[in-house]
Image (spheres, rainbow, N blue to C red):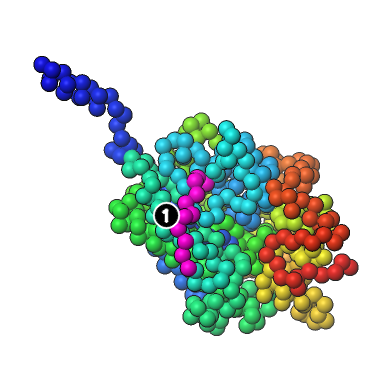
Amino acid sequence: MRKLLFFALLFAFFSCQPQTQENTDTRPNILFAIADDVSFPHMSAYGTSWVNTPAFDRVAENGLLFMRAYTPNAKCSPSRSCILTGRNSWQLEEAANHVPYFPSKFTTFMESLAANGYFTGHTAKGWAPGKPGERQGKTRELTGPAFNEHTTTPPARFISNNDYAKNFEAFLEARPDSLPFCFWYGALEPHRAYEYGAGVNKGGKQISQIEEVPNFWPDTDSIRTDMMDYAFELEYFDQHLMQMLDMLEEAGELENTIVVVTSDNGMPFPRVKGQAYEMSNHLPLAIMWPNGIKKAGRTIEDFVSFIDLAPTFIEVAELSQEESKMQVMQGSPLTDIFNSEKEGIVNPERNHVLIGKERHDVGRPEDQGYPIRGIIKDGLLYVQNYEPERWPVGNPETGYLNTDGSPTKTQILNMRYAEDSLKDYWQMNFGKRPTEELYRIEEDPACVNNLALNPEYTPMLEAMKTQMHAELQAQGDPRTMGEGYVFDEYEYAQSNSRGFYERYMSGEDIKAGWVNESDFQQKE
């Protein structure tokens, strides 16, 4: 009798325990891989021959290759803010700027997933640079806890010693078996600085492999070498991604993992990163999910924005807006594309994107930004520069600090006082800009032939401008409501950035960003 009672109690105990999610939680895992500063089309899946990215190509071949993916804001922290919240940067208060305090009111999709049964984490660069703030007395983990313990010997100077793949393995080992995961692989490549010549000397590349140098730079050996160093670092990002894919495949987890591969903004070169042109905001994107994408191997030509990623992750995690505890998202889930078998244009309503910027790096009086809004539609890019009297890349006397220092930057700056057409390169990259710009991006992806004053394009310009302003006002953009000054009033989260211009001009020995000494010019 006593033995029967024991087994009855034992049965009752185990039957009352919650069922493990190992059998019930079939929601997909998420691996989000984001390179630091890569422009479209610089992955070999897009046909760029001087870059070799087999991992990105593998994701594209077994999933979807997006031809028109854009970030709303081509700078690190505002772009990542858009990804994490599903909202455009002008809807994110301080987070519209670079190096901000992250507003407490906005929850990230990583925080939401962690609160709803996902095991989350990141390695290397999550949301940055800036300060994430606190909740309940703890520093917020906007991209989950960090897994950065393992290091390796990098193949060149300035490449991170973070063993990204090993840290992903540590994350997987730490995960409870019952939980789906969401991991943010935030490589530090190909962000500046570079070991000059590493692509040629260590990567076995030849500068002659580059078919075409963008026509807003001079075609010189040093600039081609700089581009190959960029390619070398990009390939390093891809190598670690391949290791991660292999781990998931060996563990039998790849089939039910959404793998997203992209970048935060364009390449760290003049007239690209931090600007609002085609190479600035147009980014590579490939997504695979064997269990969830109806037909793999498709090329997608719908316009998609980074604000579409967070609502996608929230939907596949089977969370309602209320359950997610996120602010209302502006983006639309990509599941309509996942569930289709169409190639090319899947959803005709995805026919445009909005882009813009406010304050990026330091270098202007009174911490001013360079506000821009733009719309891309029907093969055209329309840009409105709200303060054209300001220097678009930062003031000359402080080093044009919204462009990272590089051999390319230095060479073009040296052309400012040229007496021939070489001066045009300086103007295109660092000179002041008109109030309005309009480009045919299919014929002119470099965006150097401004059609804004061409009467033939006036009807199209006005239509795009009207649509852009109507949508921005509906989204509550302060810039379009006469309150754009608020973006300049938000403080930098780093004390050495606040009032940088005035302190630098007064002789204080301060520096900001990755620059070369030759980038600085005397005030004229």
- In the rendered image, the residue lying farthest to the front is 2
Percent position of residue 23, x then y: 28, 38
Residue in the image at 35% along x and 55% along y: 248
Is residue 152 one of those drawn in magenta? Answer: yes
Viewer-closest of 125 and 7: 7
Q: Quadrant of residue 136?
A: top right
Viewer-closest of 254 and 127: 127
Judge the density around disc 1: few (<14), some (14-19), many (≥20) Cα neighbours within 10 Å: many
- In the rendered image, the residue lying farthest to the right is 524
Which quadrant: the N terminus? top left
Q: Amino acid at mark 1?
A: Phe
| Relative to 373, residue 220 above or below | below
Magenta stretch: dominant SS? Answer: loop
Badge 1 element: helix
Q: Which residues are magenta?
A: 143-153
Percent position of residue 297, x then y: 38, 60
Residue where numbered disc 1 is placed = 168
Which quadrant: the C terminus? bottom right
Percent position of residue 79, x then y: 61, 52
Is residue 208 one of those drawn in magenta? Answer: no
Residue in the image at 50% along x and 45% along y: 144
Q: Does the rendering let one see residue 259?
A: no
Percent position of residue 370, x then y: 76, 55
